[in-house]
Image (tube, rainbow, N blue to C red):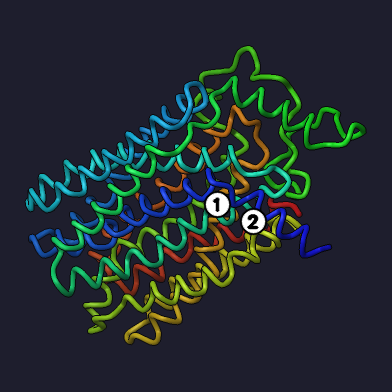
Amino acid sequence: MPNKGKSDSLHEIFTRDFLLLATVNLAMFFGFQMTNVGLPVYVAQLGANAQMVGLIGTVMTITAVVVRVFAGPLLDRFGRKGALVGGSVIMAVSIFSYAVFPIVGVILGVRLLQGIGWGLGSTASSTMAADVIPKRRFAEGMGYFALTNAVSSALAPAVSISLVQGPGAHYMIYVAAGCTALAFVLALFQRNTASRQAAAERTVAESDAGTRPDERKPRSSAPAGQHPANIGQAVTAQAGPPASTSILDTVFERRAVFPGMLMLLVNIGFGCITTFIALHGLEQGVDNVSVYFIAYAVVTLASRPFIGRLIDRYGYRLPSILSCAGTVLTLVLIGLSNSAPLFACAGALAGLGIGTAMGVYQAMAVASVEPWRRGVATSTYFIAFDVGIAIGSLLGGMVAGALGYTAMYIVVAAFPLVAGILSAAKVKN
């Protein structure tokens, strides 16, 4: 009987809509991460210095942040599919343009366009996933969905580096553009999920159909640190959105700010890894730094199914602290790495650190909000996600230009350390 119940719950998570969304997200993230790692090498080959390489990574992220401010409210009011389709096609066109216009200044401008597509598409896909995941298995379901982000962050850079250092940067660009084009095609077949009113109606229907009569009573929304066994069903039984909200509440979800800030601190280190690890490897005489990403992928895949269940059962605090500690060790070890085995060890730590953080904080950001606030919560979380990468790319470029890559990685390890301290102090079981 327990096995049957477990199978049924997994079947509820892995629906047609969820699997299609996960595939779209995987393809879109794959193209995004390929350019994040391969493009710095490409523009360096075109003559860009370390500061310009950092700026190439930053401008796209800043654009995505601005887009997300408006994307969340639009998704909640009008539905999600249009943003998903539009974002993926904009990304595909902009990535392909890097090969057509191999000029640093033009690439810098096109990165702005890619940022628009990334801000729309990634916000829409994550919001739609939150719409279709069963609430009683919410942290586990979001963990599985976030696995597509983590796997892309692990495998795409390895593929990107192999192509840049092998056949050439143009092949990296063509593959990345092809991945995002695949995301666009698949997005056309995705059913649209909740607009604001539809989400409210669906919540009432799910509450009536999925709970016992004695359980059908209002539940208040839980704070971000509350035990996820209750968070999964902690959306309010209110029939619709409040009549009026402030302008700030229209574009930001306050309950998603704290997990977003924790992810921002972790992503400062992650941004330095994706932007500079290939260049750091070359400086250390290590050609195959792709072993870092391979080890990252293996550990992430092996650990993620257990992380979601652990969160649903025991809460966010312990996984949050461990993920930050793993990220700190990852950055220090990358800075000290001068051989492929050391880069591989750093990748294994990153799977437990950065890979876990992506699942933990994304689930925290959206688990406690009402269905008609999921778009805003998702955009709030990803604004912080992108700002962290932008700060990492820009700050990393400045520190690397002054002190070198080894010192840079050790310096930025302070940021996930702060995230770990905040997790220990503020995140509740």
User: Dot 2: few (<14), some (14–19), or many (≥20) neighbours within 10 Å?
Assistant: many
Whether 127 is drawn above or below 43: the answer is above
Quadrant for the C terminus in the image: bottom right
> Dot 1 corresponds to which residue?
262
Residue 335 lies in what quarter of the image? Answer: bottom left
Whether 249 is drawn above or below 334: the answer is above
**Amino acid beneath label 2:** Ser
Q: Earlier in the sequence, mark 1 or mark 2?
A: 1
Q: Position of residue 42 (x, y in %)?
A: 15, 61
Is residue 371 among the parts visible in the rendering? yes
The one of 223 and 214 positioned closer to us in this rendering: 214
Q: Position of residue 285 (x, y in %)?
A: 23, 84
- Residue at image position (39%, 32%) is 83
> SS at mark 2?
helix
Whether 218 is drawn above or below 414: the answer is above
Q: Position of residue 225 (x, y in %)?
A: 70, 47
User: Dot 1: few (<14), some (14–19), or many (≥20) neighbours within 10 Å?
Assistant: many
In the visual, does 165 lie left or right of 237?
Answer: left
> Dot 2 corresponds to which residue?
423
CA separation in Å, label 1 and label 2? 8 Å
**Amino acid beneath label 1:** Leu
In the visual, does 2 lie left or right of 107?
Answer: right
Whether 75 is drawn above or below 157: the answer is above
